[in-house]
């Protein structure tokens, strides 16, 4: 972002990190980066800029004290799972978090094991990957905007700039 703003000093950003999808068609945001299997709203302009995977991570202190699960399963007892509050489960040994940042902090502080994208988890030296990404753990990364926002020159310039940068970062993380 800093590089783009340096090249385009009249452009300003407001970052909104949210677990819910902001409604781009209603103008809640001009551009979104979404990590999902697909973009279901056909009215949006979506460009796939890469892919990532998820798997489970734990802090070094958690692993030293409790060990780590060695594979993904619906029941990874006796480990406490750290889950976002909207994720349904029948498990009782769960720590619920409102945001991905809260979940990452709970994992880092040894509260249990939780899922992160490999892009995030592998870059954090405080975390240990419990096991390789399980089957079906692939996620696409999309740069998304509305047709109305796309009409603006700065939105077109930024999406072109960001698509390349995001793609390079994700590719490097997957190698």
Image (tube, rainbow, N blue to C red):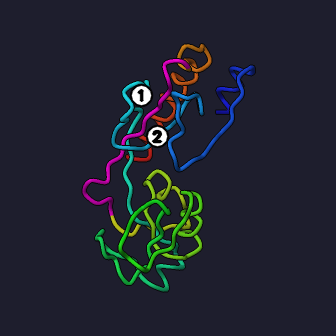
Instruction: Name the residue located 42 percent from the left edge and 28 percent from the top edge.
Output: 46
**Residue linked to disc 1:** 46
* 73 horizontally vs 100: left or right: left
Which one is in front, 57 or 153? 153
Asked where in the image residue 152 lies, by quadrant, the reply is top right
- Residue 34 badge: 2
Instruction: Name the residue located 46 percent from the left edge and 59 percent from the top edge.
Output: 86
Q: Position of residue 141 (x, y in %)?
A: 42, 39
Please report the bounds of the magenta region as a residue range: 132-148
Q: Magenta stretch: residue 95 in it? A: no
SS category of the residue bearing label 1: strand
Instruction: Name the residue located 32 percent from the left edge and 74 percent from the top edge.
Output: 70
Asked if residue 34 is positioned above or below residue 119 in the image, the reply reads above
Asked if residue 110 is positioned above or below residue 32 in the image, the reply reads below
Which one is in front, 118 or 159? 159
Residue occupying the far front of the picture: 26
Nearer the N terminus, badge 1 or badge 2? 2
């Amino acid at each position: 972002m800093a590089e783009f703003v340096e090249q385009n000093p009249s452009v300003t950003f407001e970052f909104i990190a949210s677990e819910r999808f902001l409604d781009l068609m209603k103008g809640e945001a001009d551009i979104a980066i979404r990590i999902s299997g697909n973009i279901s709203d056909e009215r949006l302009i979506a460009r796939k800029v890469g892919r990532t995977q998820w798997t489970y991570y734990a802090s070094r202190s958690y692993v030293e004290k409790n060990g780590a699960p060695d594979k993904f399963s619906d029941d990874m007892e006796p480990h406490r799972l750290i889950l976002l509050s909207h994720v349904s489960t029948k498990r009782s040994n769960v720590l619920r978090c409102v945001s991905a940042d809260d979940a990452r902090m709970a994992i880092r502080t040894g509260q249990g094991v939780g899922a992160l994208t490999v892009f995030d988890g592998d870059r954090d030296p405080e975390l240990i990957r419990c096991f390789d990404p399980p089957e079906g753990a692939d996620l696409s990364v999309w740069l998304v905007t509305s047709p109305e926002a796309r009409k603006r020159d700065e939105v077109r310039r930024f999406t072109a700039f960001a698509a390349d940068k995001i793609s390079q970062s994700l590719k490097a993380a997957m190698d």
